[in-house]
Image: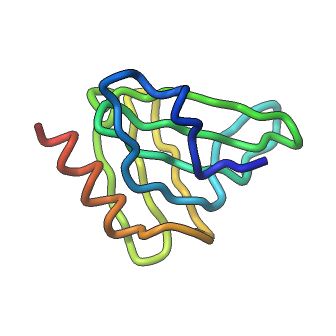
Amino acid sequence: MILDNVNPNDLFPTENKGPSVLGTIEYSVQGATEFEGAFIATNERIIMNVDMNGEFYYRSIAYNEVEKIEYDGESINFTFNIGPIPMKNIQKGDVEAFVQYVSDKIDQ
């Protein structure tokens, strides 16, 4: 299961893929709280792909749903309008470029 990429056919016609990060997402579902997952930034939204015990989960997040994003050197701390969804144990991706890209989009 490739989590940190998106099929170009799944993007909107005006959408371009930006930076992505792969790590452990803390997201509480049915008693489990940690899943391997990725955030993929595009010029129009954030795509969250998660492996939930072998089941693929996808969520599209509009930039206006992001309240805050911070990187503390270890974890990305996202705060969405539905609450916090942190990512730790980042395995792949340029974290600082991702955080800056998302920060620029939410400040627009």
Judge from the rendering whether residue 24 lies leftward or rightward of residue 107; answer left or right: right
Q: Establish if 107 lies above or below 58.
A: below
Number of numbered callouts drawn: 0
Where's residue 93, x and y in %? 50, 67
Depth check: 54 or 79 in front?
54
Q: Residue at x 21, y 40 (%)?
A: 106
Where's residue 6, x and y in %? 57, 40
Q: Quadrant of residue 91?
A: bottom right
Q: Establish if 1 lies above or below 74.
A: above
Q: Residue at x 87, y 43 (%)?
A: 53
Where's residue 90, x and y in %? 58, 69
Q: Residue at x 62, y 61 (%)?
A: 23
Where's residue 9, x and y in %? 54, 27
Looking at the image, the residue that sits furthest to the left is 108
Looking at the image, the residue that sits furthest to the bottom is 73
Q: Quadrant of residue 80?
A: top left
Depth check: 84 or 50 in front?
50
Quadrant of image for the C terminus: top left
